[in-house]
Amino acid sequence: MSFITHIWWRFCDTIVIELHVIGDMEKILIIEDDLDIVSLLEIHLQDLSFQVSKAYDGLSGLEMARNQDFDLVILDLTLPGIDGLEVCRRLRSERRYTPIMMLTARTEEIDKILGLEMGADDYLTKPFSVREFVARVKAILRRTRIIQNKDGSTTSQKQLNFQDLCIDLDKRAVLVKDKRVELSPKEFDLLSLLAAHPGKSFNRGSLLNLVWGYDFEGYEHTVNSHINRLRRKIEPDMGQPTYILTTWGVGYRFNENL
């Protein structure tokens, strides 16, 4: 057992975690090569009534994620075989949108940016407290169950329709001129949030908090890149957007005049 892992274990032993059952045996896959960390996370996830599967290298973890349905993948960045970034990239390229939380001992900004840009839903740097880990797991799973308004309000609408754009909230599907457009989970969440509040301007920090669930300070450009990708997929003219408008000096809003 490494010194850091030993200290982490002792620190975690002092934490009293509120047990809260989020769902009926939701399934979580841990892809991590540190056996001590896997055991620690498994204990606390099982305490929360999750069904836990484990893989200890990138290739086997990728195959498990491909062949089974999971509610969340906890993915280490540095893995034998293929690394976590490549696992994430391949899953997203295959249009598999299971939420992904990345774990890593790295602290470089570029690694965080790459993980988020490739479609990871959250990013946690080791060593971390189990309390924070559990809180983030709860937040991710809660967001996957609530695909309507991300500010906590609800809507009875199952579809949002604006000219040639149709957003099916139940099916998480987007149609432009009756043709399906494939969006990443975060692209869909951004679009559905903005479209549920036409005319309301959101700054980048608010969008990070509402869609990603945490304040990724300094990563507002992640919102910009997701907005740009969304516009390329749904806008008839990138130079003069119809749906997602820029509120200068603030952030973005959905066109209220459609």
Image: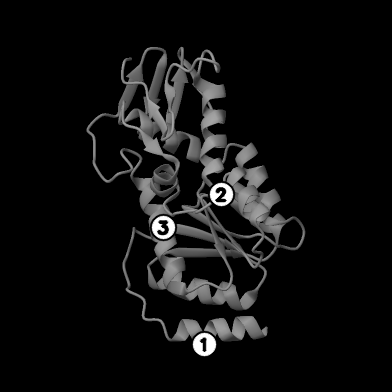
Q: Mark 3 = which residue? A: 26
Q: In which quarter of the image is residue 211?
A: top left
**Farthest residue toward the right?**
81
* Callout 2–callout 3 Cβ contact below 8 Å: no
The residue at the point 50 percent across, 65 percent down is 52
Where in the figure is residue 122, as x and y percent of width and height?
Answer: 51, 54
The residue at the point 43 percent across, 36 percent down is 190
Could you tell me the amino acid type at mark 1? Arg
Taking the image as shown, residue 38 lies to the left or right of residue 258, namely: right
* Coloring applied to the structure: one colour
| Crowd tier of the residue under label 3, counting other residues whose Cα lies within 10 Å: few below 14, some 14–19, many 20 or above | some
Q: What element carries label 3?
A: loop
Q: Mark 1 = which residue? A: 10
Vertical position of residue 212 compared to residue 24: above or below? above
Q: Earlier in the sequence, mark 3 or mark 1?
A: 1
Q: Earlier in the sequence, mark 1 or mark 2?
A: 1
Could you tell me the amino acid type at mark 3? Glu
Where in the figure is residue 183, as x and y percent of width and height?
Answer: 52, 31
Q: Quadrant of residue 136?
A: bottom left
**Farthest residue toward the front?**
249
Q: Mark 2 = which residue? A: 120
Vertical position of residue 113 compared to residue 8: above or below? above
Q: Distance between the residues labelled 3 and 1?
A: 28 Å
Q: Quadrant of residue 19?
A: bottom left
